[in-house]
């Protein structure tokens, strides 16, 4: 079995995947034509040429522009189905999918539209591809905590379809503590909590996400390495970092995959998982990220198995489902 085939054969969970970031240029153009949306690009090649990002903000600007093509229940169904089909081919058995309601509600597309589209695709994917999934509702940092609280109120009729809340978008200048109230409200109704922190923002944001927001996972978290006490806290509390190596390189957090700090953090006892973040924009789905770290960081098959096992252990799946997937990983290994 080749390394690529081995990676795809490993049952795994993907838990740092933004559904809006799976909108491939071809689908973007198809949806824009279907919905009579005018895009600022003449062709798919023009879109791909725009994928040279200077930083996180320049990427987000492009992401939000592309999302304007998403208008109908069918659009969100098509988008989610395409991702889950691709994830199945990469060995993903369960996906905990981020979605950004404010990206859509800000332009007049409401919860009934995208939630219905997500639900249809998720049900069909489990039946057809064998991929289960859940949804994590993320709040956009740059819209601040008050807007997040209003979005949470809008989401209340759909909380039975949502497993947790998260925090994403522009990081620098928008500390996690601004969102204390909405995260407390979410935990009070039984939702799990995660947050992007320590990607471009400082280690202090990781501390806040843990101590103020009460998160169970840190999304990215690469800059935690700069603070030895923070790394010790992450290890002691068993907090998992959901890492996205190809994304980090494309956004110039690291110059090369060989410079990524995943292996160094693993050596210090940190639990981490491999994910694809916004794969349509960063040039690789989750198996590509596994392959990149295997090659660039010289990880052997046992280390890849550990990463896959960590993805199951850090997931929000029930214990019996986790046990089943752990046994399937052991069989492959």
Image (spheres, rainbow, N blue to C red):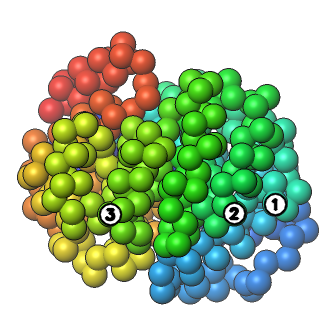
Residue at 22% across / 67% down in the picture? 226
Q: Are marks 2 and 3 in contact (CB under 8 Å)?
A: no
Q: Is residue 116 left or right of residue 124?
A: right
Quadrant in the rendering for residue 134: top right
**Mark 1 — residue?**
106
Q: Secondary structure at mark 1?
A: loop
Q: Secondary structure at mark 2?
A: helix
Mark 3 is surrounded, within 10 Å at the Cα level, by few (under 14), some (14 to 19) or many (20 or more) other residues, namely many
**Badge number at residue 203:** 3
**Eye-nearest disc, 3 or 1:** 3
**Eye-nearest disc, 1 or 2:** 2
Mark 2 is surrounded, within 10 Å at the Cα level, by few (under 14), some (14 to 19) or many (20 or more) other residues, namely few
Could you give the CA–CA distance between mark 3 and mark 1, rounded to whole angstroms?
A: 31 Å
**Mark 2 — residue?**
143
Q: Relative to 230, does residue 30 appear above or below in the rendering?
A: below
Q: Are marks 1 and 2 in contact (CB under 8 Å)?
A: yes
Residue at 17% across / 48% down in the picture? 232
Residue at 38% across / 46% down in the picture? 210
């Amino acid at each position: 079995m080749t390394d690529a085939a081995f990676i795809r054969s490993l049952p795994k969970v993907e838990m740092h995947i933004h559904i809006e970031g799976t909108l491939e240029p071809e689908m973007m153009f198809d949806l824009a034509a279907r919905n009579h949306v005018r895009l600022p690009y003449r062709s798919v090649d023009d879109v791909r040429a725009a994928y040279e990002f200077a930083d996180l903000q320049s990427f987000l600007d492009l992401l939000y522009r592309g999302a304007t093509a998403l208008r109908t229940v069918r659009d969100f169904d098509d988008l989610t189905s395409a991702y889950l089909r691709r994830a199945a081919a990469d060995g993903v058995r369960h996906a905990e999918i981020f979605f950004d309601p404010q990206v859509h509600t800000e332009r007049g597309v409401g919860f009934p539209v995208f939630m219905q589209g997500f639900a249809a695709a998720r049900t069909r994917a489990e039946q057809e591809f064998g991929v289960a999934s859940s949804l994590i509702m993320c709040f956009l940092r740059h819209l601040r905590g008050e807007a997040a609280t209003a979005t949470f109120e809008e989401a209340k009729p759909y909380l039975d379809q949502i497993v947790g809340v998260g925090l994403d978008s522009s990081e620098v200048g928008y500390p996690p503590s601004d969102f204390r109230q909405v995260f407390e409200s979410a935990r009070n109704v039984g939702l799990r909590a995660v947050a992007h922190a320590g990607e471009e923002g400082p280690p202090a944001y990781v501390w806040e996400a843990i101590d103020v927001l009460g998160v169970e996972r840190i999304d990215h978290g690469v800059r935690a390495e700069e603070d030895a006490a923070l790394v010790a806290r992450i290890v002691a509390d068993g907090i998992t970092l959901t890492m996205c190596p190809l994304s980090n390189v494309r956004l110039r957090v690291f110059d090369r995959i060989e410079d990524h700090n995943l292996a160094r953090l693993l050596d210090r006892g940190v639990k981490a998982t491999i994910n694809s973040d916004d794969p349509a924009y960063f040039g690789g789905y989750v198996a590509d990220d596994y392959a990149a770290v295997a090659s660039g960081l010289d990880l052997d098959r046992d280390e890849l198995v550990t990463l896959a096992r960590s993805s199951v252990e850090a997931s929000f799946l029930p214990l019996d489902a986790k046990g089943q997937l752990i046994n399937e990983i052991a069989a492959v290994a």
